Image: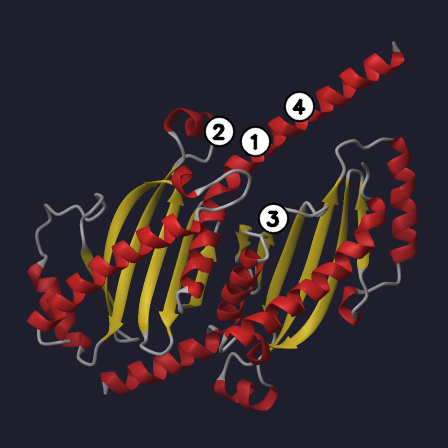
Amino acid sequence: MSEELEQIFVSLVDTSWKRYEENKRNGLMDDLLVGAVIASNVEAGYALIDLESDGVRHYLRFEKLATKERLIFQLRNLTEDLVGAKVLGRHARVVMGYGTMTTNIGKIWKIFKDEVKSSMIDSNEPGVISFDADITAGYVYAQVPLLLEIDQYLDAGYQVNQPLLQSHIDATIHSLRKYLNGRLSMSGGA
Amino acid sequence: MLSFLSKFQHAQEMRESKDEILTGEIVRAMTRKNMPAIGFNTAGEDQRIIFKPNHSILYKVSITVDRKTGGSKISQAMFGSKAWITFQAQIKNQVADPDDLLEMYRTDAKNIFKSPMFGDVKLDHQLNSVFATKRVTVDIDKYIPQDEAGVQTLTDFLQEHINDVEEKLKPFKKG
C-alpha cells in the first residue's frame, strides 16, 4: 500500500514538472529562434556585431567582415503566453534587413527619401520593403517585416530545424540584396 | 569628408563590437555541441547567454562575456582586448525535502572562501537547484576564430570549463 502511494506521489511530481517545463519552454521559444539565427549567420560567415534583448524584443546586427555587408534582424514574440500560443500557434514579427556601405550615402539617402514621401505607405505591413540608413557609418539598408510561425523552425525539445531556418534567411536576404543593389545602381550609388 | 568619417566610424564600431563577435562565436560553438541558446541578457555592460544542454545532467549553462579593456584604440594598444568569461552551470532536482536544507548549509560552509575569480569553482546550493560558477580572464582576439581550427580551439576552451563546473555538480544530482 505504502509503495503504491509513493508511486502516485512520484507521478504527481512528474506531471507537475512536465506542466512547469511546458510553460517555461513556451516563453523561451523566441530566444531559441534568436540563438538559431545567430548560429546560422555565424556559420554563413557573418560576425555578430550588435545584440540587444529585453526578453521579448530582440535586435541583432551582423557583418560579413570581408565585404562589409550587413544584416539586421528584429524579432518580437507575439505569443508570449501559453494560451495564445496553443490557440494561434507561436508567432513572431521579424524584420530582416540587408545593408551595404556606400561612398555617397548623403546623396543616395536624399534620393530614397524623396521617392517615399507618401503618408499612405504603412511600412509595418508584412512584405513592404522599406529603406533605412546609418548616415555616420555610411550604410543604407533594405528591410522587410514578416510574420513568421516560430514552431515551423522548432523540432522536439530544444532542437532547431537549422536547414529550414537557413533557407528562409537566405531567400529573404537574396531578395533584399537584389532589390537594394538594383535601386542603388539606378541612383548612381552602387 | 563623410567617406573618411564612415571609415573611422566603421573601425571604431568593429573595435567596440569584439565582445559581441566573440558572443556570436560562442553561440555557434555551443549550438554545434547541442547546447542551443535559450536566453539573452544584455541589459548591463556584459552579455549573458543561457544555453540548454540537450543531453546532460545540467539543467542550464550560462556564459557571460564581460569586456574589461580594448574598447578604445588607446586601451586596445595598451592592454589588448581582455574580458572575463564566467561559466555558471545549474542542476535541478525534481524533489526537494528538508534534508536538502542541511546539505545547503554544508555546501555553503565549504565555499565561504572560494572565489570564482581565482579559477575556483564556487558552489551555491538553493533547495532544489545547485549552481557552480567559474570565471576566467581571456584575450578576446585569441578566441575569435579566423578558420575552422579557431572554431575548434574556442569549442575546446568552452567544453573544458563546462566539464569543470559539471564535475563539481555531479554529486548533487539525484535520481
Q: Determine the residue positioned at 72% across, 64% down.
A: B161
Q: Name the amino acid, label 1.
A: Glu
Pointer 3: what residue?
B52
- Chain of the residue on which disc 1 is drawn: A
Q: Determine the residue positioned at 40% across, 59% down.
A: A60
Q: B72 or B140, which is in the foreground?
A: B140
The image quadrant that residue A14 belongs to is top right
**Disc 1 vs disc 2: Cβ atoms closer than 8 Å?**
yes
Q: Residue furthest top?
A: A1
- Do circles 3 and 2 both sit on a common chain? no
| Quarter of the figure with the C terminus of chain B | top right
Q: A153 or B59, which is in the foreground?
A: A153
Gap between marks 4 and 1 measured at Cα: 11 Å
Q: Determine the residue positioned at 56% across, 31% down.
A: A22
Pointer 2: what residue?
A82
| Between discs 4 and 1, the one toward the N terminus | 4
Q: Name the amino acid, label 4.
A: Thr
Q: B46 or A10, which is in the foreground?
A: A10
Is residue A55 in sight in this rendering?
no
- Chain of the residue on which disc 4 is drawn: A
